[in-house]
Amino acid sequence: MEFSITAQSLEKAATACLVVGITEGARFSPSAKIIDQASQRYLSRLKTQGDLPTKAGKTLLLHNLPGVAAPRVLLVGTGSAKSLTERDYRAAVRAAVLALDGGGAGTALFCLAELPVKGRDEAWKLEQLMLVAHEAAYRITRVADQQDPACTLERILLPTPDKVKPSAMKTLMGHCKAIANGMALTRDLGNLPPNLCTPGYLAQQALSLGRTWKLRVQVLEQSDMEKLGMGALLAVSAGSRQPPKLIVMQYSGASRQQKPVVLVGKGITFDTGGISLKPAPEMDEMKFDMCGAASVFGTLRAVAEMKLPLNLVGIVPTCENMPDGNATRPGDIVRSMSGQTVEILNTDAEGRLILCDALTYAERFEPEVLIDVATLTGACVIALGNEASGLFANDEKLQHALQVAGDHMGDRAWPLPLWDEYQEGLKSNFADMANVAGRAGGSITAACFLSRFTTQQRWAHLDIAGVAYKGGKEKGATGRPVKLFCRYLLQRSGL
Ligand code: BES
Ligand code: MN
Ligand code: ZN
């Protein structure tokens, strides 16, 4: 999707389509008013007839309105009258793109950023419009089949903003494109089948990302991990024919002295559960168990494309969790790189095992902040559903900054506690800790496990099990939480 600014007046604009918001209640939006007047009250008559789409997400495509140069006018319902909710605003943008997809208009002038959104300024509205439109135009990259046709709406024109200067608008457009490209990469990687998207494949992707975006990329092999004493990570990959990888990607946008933000993403390319085998229904969705890793790839790509003035390190521990004769058994005890020993009571609680060694490894980068991101627990889906990521942190400021970043982007995270009381459940009679506690508070005890490996760092953990992908008819990766990360990093860069 391309974006450009136009100074043309609405009724005379030489474009294939005008997109105008229709709010519930008496008043027309400024653009609707212009079109109504130009067309001898065409919209007013529709209104009298009760034919205007006012509900959020509803659309109506009109053709050849008298007095309007554009051959099409798409009316988009935006819901409640005075001030839209952020949700309704995004829904309107999405609905407009979907309504035009497959039609004859390759270009459309979107007049939606004029609508009032409670508590948000024009820059926010333009930014969200661009991000949501980019996302709505995304297509799953097919590997075995014919590719779905691309979104037929190829370019969105925006009226010259009132309050956002041309230079700021140019920057914003670039940032949105970069973020959308990052999200598309995250979604592509997540959507790939697990026979193709192996640890080795992710390592290759990292190397190619590094070449394109001038990242320093290093891939640690099994033998390196053995030397480092990553017994927890190696225990997870033991049952797989695929060799594990530990991928390190470094983006340098600031001086060497500036400490980096370090992102660590869970990269289980397929999670069978191991010997603690998962039940068959929906097991295919465990190909999405590398979405944390994919979001680290996407964020690095976006940050490099935005050329943010900071240092960012992405660490991806990646392997497969499979059962075979060499697989780790429930009851096995391993030593993590930190020196702490772990009794593996459930081989399906593997995410924390690969993350704990990666978090220890992250220490060598002396992070300013350390954030891990993982499809870690089914319990998080039970707690927060598919709306919010679970957010844990040992630093209140960091927790707050991530929450605000998510709110801004509609990529929300919600705080959960890390109280010491929850640590109790991880007690083991045979090792420093067990890798699971009871069923209760499962996402919290998982985070507590990780917290034991990050005591030296300002650290946050995002459990994205409920948000990284959708199941059912809409099955596919969402690209979350790339937007949250990008907003947080933009904020840190003072942008
Ligand atoms: N990858 C899963 C978590 C998951 C479950 C993500 C459902 C997305 C949807 C993780 O490795 C796992 O299996 N966790 C176990 C932990 C349990 C054994 C303590 C779980 O959530 O059941
Ligand atoms: Mn698992
Ligand atoms: Zn898993």
Image (cartoon, rainbow, N blue to C red):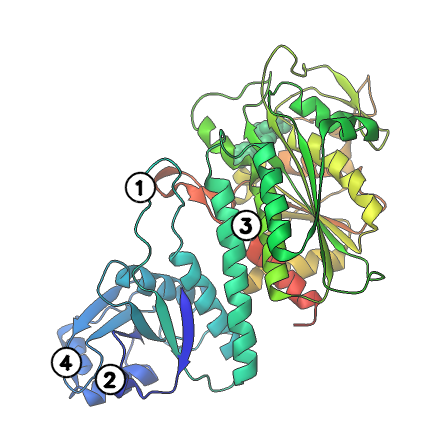
**Could you tell whether 320 is left or right of 188 in the image?**
right
**Could you tell whether 307 is left or right of 13 in the image?**
right
Callout 4 amino acid: Arg
Q: Is 282 drawn above or below residue 481 in the view shown?
A: above
Q: Are marks 3 and 1 in contact (CB under 8 Å)?
A: no
Which-is-in-front pick, marks 4 and 2? 2
Residue occupied by mark 1: 146
Which-is-in-front pick, marks 4 and 1? 1
Q: Is 89 drawn above or below residue 208 in the view shown?
A: below
* Mark 2 / mark 1, whichever is N-terminal: 2
Q: What element carries label 1?
A: loop
Whole-angstrom CA distance, mark 2 to mark 3, is 39 Å
Point out residue 46 in the picture as x, y percentages from the top left corner: 16, 76
Label disc, if present, on residue 388 of the rendered structure: 3
Check the picture and name the quadrant holding the N terminus: bottom left
Give neighbour class at mark 2: few <14, some 14-19, many 20+ (Cα, 10 Å): many
Callout 1 amino acid: Gln
Point out residue 328 in the picture as x, y percentages from the top left corner: 68, 16
Q: Is mark 2 within 8 Å of ligand 1?
A: no
* Mark 4 / mark 2, whichever is N-terminal: 2
Q: Quadrant of residue 54?
A: bottom left
